Structures are given as C-alpha cells and as structure tokens.
Amino acid sequence: MEVFPVEMLDEYMHLQSVSNDHQIRAIVRFKSHLDLEILKKSVMITSERIPLLGCMYVRKRNKRYWQLKEFISDDYIRIHTFESLDTNYVDILAEIPNELGPQILLRVFRNNMHDLLVVTVNHMIFDGTGLKEYLYLLARVYSGIETEVSSLDRQLGTLLRNITLLETIRAIFDRPQEIVEPNFLKIGEGTSPTKLNILRISGGELKNIKEFCKAHNATVNDFVIAALANSIFEIDTITDSVSMQMMVDLRRYIKRHKPGEFGNFASMETVSVSKESGNFVKLLISISEKTRKMKSGLPGLRNILLMKLVWTFLSLNTFDILLENEIKKFSISTSNLGIIETDKMVFGSNRVDDAFMLTSIKKQPAMQLTFSTFMGTMTLSILGEYSEENSNNISKCLGGIKREIQRTAE
C-alpha cells in the first residue's frame, strides 16, 4: 500500500489527545434533501484528491507515516432518519473517525423536510480553514463543477521557506507572555456527557458589536476575547489576570496563497489579560493594543520554529514528551474560524440555510471558545466533557458574553 510522509504538526495534533479528541467539525443544514448517491460519489472523488482522508496513521517506535487503505463510500458516510432534528446536536457529534481510517466521517441526519450534514475530520489532516475549503470542494464536486484530481501540498516547508533568517531569529527570541492559569475550570473527579453550549449572535447584534469596536479601535475578535475574559473574572473573583491562546492561521506566511490550501497550518499565540476594575471598555482597549502589537510581529511562528528544532534534531520520543507537557499548560483558548462563504456552499440546486464550525471535544480543565459566521449570524460554541460545576461555569460564561453584547445596543 502507498505511504505518505508525516508532517510535524500531524504528530503534534495526535498528542492533543491528552486534552481533547483532536477532531474538528462542521454542521450544515440544508433547506431540502441531498441526493445521497451524488454525495457518496462526491466524497469518493474528494478522497482521491486528498488521499490522506483514506489513510491510517501508523506510529512505530521511531517512525510515523500515513498508509493508504481501501475504503468504499459507506465507510465515509452514515445516513440517519429522524422525525425531527435535535438542535442540541449532542447525539449527532458522538461518532468520530479514528486513526485507523478513514480520517473523515460525513453523517446525514434526515427528517421529512431537511438534511443536516455533520462533517467530522481528524485535526491532523485539516485545521478549521482547511475544513472550510473541503466543504467548498465538496460543494463544487457535488454540483459537477470540479471533478479533476490535483496535487496536494501540505508540507510545513512550504510555509517556512518564506521566512527569512532574520525573521527566524526574531521569532525564536521573541519573549513570550507570562502564562497565568485561572481557577475558572477545575480538574473535577466526575464528568458529564459531552455538552455543546451555543450562543447565536444575530446580524443586528453583530452590527452593534462592529460599531462599538470601531469606536474603540478594536476588532470583533478583540471584543469576543474581552467579553470572555470579563465573564471569567466575574465567575472567578479571586483571579485578576488570565492567559488565553488565540488561534493563528500560518497561511499568512505563504506567499501567493490561493484558496484551496488544505492541511493543518494552525498555531497559537498567548494573550495575557488583566482585570480592569469592572470596566469593559478599558479591558477591550487593553486587549486591542496587545493583539495589534502581536499582529505587527510574527504571530504563531515562535512555537512552530521551536517545535521544528526539536522535531529535526531530537528523537520522536523526546518530541512527544516535551510537547505533551506544553499542551497541558494551557486551559483556555479561542478560535475565530471566520466567515463561511454563502456562495461557495451551493450543492447543486440545494441551498444551505445554516452552517457553523466546531472544534474538538475538550477534556476538563481545558476549554475552547470557537466562533464562525454564516449569512450574517455568528455562532459561538464551547464543546467538552465537564463536571457539573465546570459545565455550570461555562453556561454562566456564555451568559456573560451575551450581556456584553446586549450592552453594545444601549
């Protein structure tokens, strides 16, 4: 069987299992029923274009590689029929692909009017941007617009070759922010079933947020981070500072980038936030200043370059030990997966009326706030397995974000 080389970030994402299930998800609701035979054929075509979807991940003592396996369409797709579609979505997230392959699973939940498509993929294959690009590709293949199989370049070297020696030195010696872990979520003894907390932000509310941010020279991303931090400070009154990881898309360093860049090019950058005596505007401005400074530098590169040094010069076992310890340091992160483009989500004559992205199922005390936007509506979500106390705090946290959103209209 054909084998493919492993990228450093593949192994890094595999190690994420200490804190999450390292899967990412997209939920897409259609106004009517899909043609299931066309969908099955489309999935097989996309698996030819992206062969790693049909591989198993092989880990031996000092060796890692992807091995191609033979799968049929039924290995990639599950069909479920319901009288109604549960908007809680918990049950439909239960089944995931595994590293024995295939690396992607599409589940169609059908009632008498609609289809709900849940796409779950191993984060080792795609990051959030890559999953969006996969949805766009699937839509084009389903619609008969694109059937050709083209080459796939997911090598980290494609990214790093654009980084100069001076930039490499700057990034490596850039002083990281101090990590401050809050007592917001605790390592409880018991866990509850997987719970998905969702907060919908309407087009009108999003417009208010943008106007509020413009008045304070901030971004919507800054606002969400500030609202999250403020909610944590309200719940954990002892803590007066907290560190969060922000997702950084490393495609920013790929020159002449074109849409369709599949793969996992996600990195993280730390932002430390201090309590501003209950003043949300001061908190927002402080975060905005920090993120602007971060963006003016080389965000996301330091960790990747240091990982690359370990990956290149030390053993795989050493890489695994060092990275697992790093992964355990962080408990709170945010991931802005941007806009899901409406005009690229057309499946033949079938139209999409709702879509949003979800990241991995976190294990306490880790938590990730994910947000994406479709047709003017932003969806914020937190997905994880938590004790009752932690679950209640997460619900309070989203409630606090909602209150800050409502204040923008005052």
Image (spheres, helix red, strand yellow):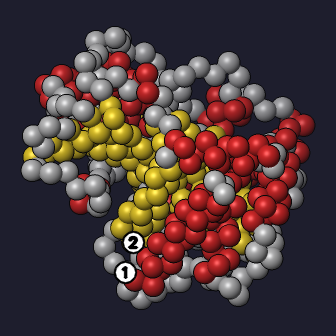
Question: Image quadrant for the C terminus?
Answer: bottom right
Mark 1 vs mark 2: which is more N-terminal?
1
Q: Residue at x 64, y 60 (%)?
A: 407
Q: Residue furthest front?
A: 410
Residue 127 percent across, percent down from the top left = 50, 42
Mark 1 neighbour density, 10 Å: few (under 14) some (14–19) many (20 or more) = some
Q: Which residue type carries mark 2? A: Glu
Identify the residue at horizontal 46%, vertical 18% (top origin): 151
- What label sits on residue 99 in the rendered view? none
Q: Residue at x 68, y 27 (%)?
A: 254
- Residue 378: horizontal and vertical position, in percent? 50, 46
Q: Can you identify the residue that label 2 sits on?
A: 385
Seen from the viewer's position, the closer of residues 294 and 330 is 294
> Which quadrant holds residue 79?
top left
Q: Is the Cβ of the residue at disc 1 closer than 8 Å to that at disc 2?
A: yes
Q: Quadrant of residue 45?
A: top left
Q: What residue would you read off at disc 1?
A: 191
Residue flagged by tag 1: what amino acid is it?
Thr
Please name whichever residue, 163 or 346, is drawn nearer the observer in this view of the structure. Answer: 346
* Residue at 63% from the left image edge and 46% from the top image edge: 208
Q: Nearer the viewer, residue 271 or 68?
A: 271
| Secondary element at tag 2 | strand
- Give the CA distance from mark 1 to mark 2: 6 Å
> Is 135 left, or right, of 115 in this rendering?
right
Residue 327 horizontal side relative to residue 100, left or right? right
On-image quarter of the N terminus: top left
Vertical order, 375 against 362 (above or below)? above
Residue 215 in percent (x, y) is at 79, 46
